[in-house]
Amino acid sequence: MKKIFVCLTLILELVAMAQYCFGQAQSLTAEIRKQTIDDLSALLPDRYAYKELGQKLQQSLQQNLKAGKYDSYNSPIEFSTAVTNDLRSLNSDRHLALNYSPEVQTPNANPTAIPPPLTTEERAKSASDFNRQMNFGFKSVQFFNGNVCSLKFDYFDSYLAYSSPILDALMASLKNCDAVILDLRENTGGSSEMVGYITGFFFKDRTLSGTSYNRLTDTTTDEFITPQAKDKQLADVDLFVLTSNVTVSAAEALAYNLKYLKKAKVVGETSAGAANPGRVTRINNLFTAFIPNRHGMNVVTKTNWEGTGVPIDIPSAAEDALRVARIEALKQLRQKATGPLQRKKFDNYITFLEKTKPEKDLPEKTLRQYVGEYQGGRTITLKNGELYYARFAEAGGQLHSISNDTFMLSEGDVTITFKRNKQNRVIEMESQWSLINSPGVAMKIK
C-alpha cells in the first residue's frame, strides 16, 4: 500500500506540474480575466453562505477589476491566488477560492457524440472503486495497555452504502474498549453524512447539535445526531479526539460537535478553521470556484469554527498528541479503578508514557552493567544501544529507562529494578508485574 501511495503521489505531482507549466505558457488575456471576474462575482450574491457578504465580495471584485488590480497577472496560478486572497479579505473563509483547474479535453472518436451522464449509482461505484483501495480513509486500529484504543482515519467517504460496513466492523472491534481515541490529525474532511454516521456511535438519544443555513434555498434547518442501533453504540466510553493544524472541514465538524456536546476532549493543535461547506462551480475552461453555500451554528456555542479552528482541551504538539491522550485516558480510568492493584496498574502505564522518552536513553557504558544471566533463565542483552529482557515462556522485549536502575517492559506491565552491592556492582534484578503484589527476585549468576 505504501508503494501504491508513493506512485499515486508522484502521478499527482506530475499532473500538477504539467498543469502549472501549461498555465505558465498560456498567458491570460484581459478578456479572460474580465470574464472570470464577471462570472465569479455574479455568483456570489446568490450562492455565498452569507448573503450580505456575497454582495460586498461582488462589489469588491468589480472595483478591483475596474481599478486594474489584476492587469499585471498573466499567469493563471498567480491570478487565481490573488483573487482568492481578495475573496478572503472580508471574511477569512478557508473554503472560498478561485482555483486554476484547466478543463481536460478527452479525445473522442466521434466529436459530435455526447456521452450520456453517469447515474448516481454509477458515480458512487466509480468513486468507491478507488476509495476501496484506500480503505475508505480508515487507516488503523490500535489497542494499548489499560484497554485504551485508537482509530485513525484520514478522510470521510461520501458513499455510505460502500464505506459504512467497513466502519461498522472497525467500531465493533472497539466494543470492549474503556477509552477510545479518534485520530483526525491528518484528516482532510469529506462527507458530512459520514461525520453524522460516526457521531451516532457515541450517542444514546437523538440529539440537537445546531442549525444549518442554506443560501441556495434561503432556509434554516435543525441538525440532529441520530444514534446508531443500541448494539452498535459506544456511548459510555471515555472519548478523545486528536487534531492538528491540518485537520480541516468535516473533520473539524466531528471534533467540534463531540467537544461541545460533552462527549470528548480534544487533544493536539488548533485545527485549520474551515467550517462552511459548499460546492465547486466551473467558471470557464481554466478556472473553477469553490463557493461555500451553507453555514452552521452549534447549539451550545451559537457559532462555529470558521477562522478560529476547534479549541483544544489539552494542548500538545501534533506528533505527541496520541501519547498525551493515552495518558489522559489512563488518568480518567485510574479514577474509576476499584482496588489498589487496578490503580497500581494504571500508575505503571502512566509512568511508562510520561518517563520513557529518547532523551532519557542511557550511555552504552552504563547499560553494559546490567547485561548478563540471572536466576530462573532470565537474560539481559544489549543490542544496538538498547537493553532487552528475555525468559522462556514469559513476555520479553526492550527495556525502557525510567530512572537510575529502573526500567519498564511491555509499556508498563512489568517494572524491572536492578540492585547493586556496596561496590556498586549489579547483583540482582527485581521484577514486578503490574497486577501482582509481590516482586520476583533473581540473582545475577554470570
Image (cartoon, grey):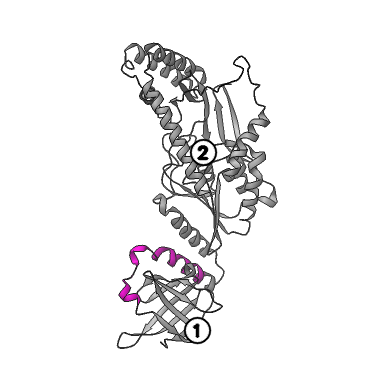
Q: Is residue 99 above or below residue 262?
A: above
Residue 408 % position (x, y): 44, 71
Q: Residue at x 39, y 13 (%)?
A: 62
Most prominent secondary structure in the magenta stretch?
helix
Furthest toward the front, the residue is 109
Residue 254 in sight: yes
Mark 1: few/some/many CA within 10 Å (<14, 14-19, 20+):
few
Name which of mark 1 and mark 2 comes first in the sequence.
Answer: 2
Q: Pick whichever, 81 or 343, lies toward us.
A: 81
Q: Is residue 132 above or below residue 314?
A: above
Amino acid under disc 1: Gly
Residue 438 % position (x, y): 51, 82
Point out which mark residue 421 bears. none
Residue 266 % position (x, y): 47, 48
Amino acid under disc 2: Gly
Q: Quadrant of residue 19?
A: top left
- Which residue in the protein does label 2 denote? 189
Is 344 within the magenta?
Answer: yes
What span is in magenta? Answer: 343-368
* Tag 1 secondary structure: helix
Apparent side of residue 69 relative to residue 229 in the rendered image (left or right): left
* Tag 2 secondary structure: loop
Residue 346 % position (x, y): 50, 67
Q: Quadrant where the C terminus lies?
A: bottom left
Q: Residue at x 34, y 17 (%)?
A: 70
Structural distance between the alpha carbons of marks 1 and 2: 53 Å
Q: Residue at x 65, y 35 (%)?
A: 125
Point out which mark residue 377 bears. 1
Q: Pick whichever, 359 or 310, lies toward us.
A: 359
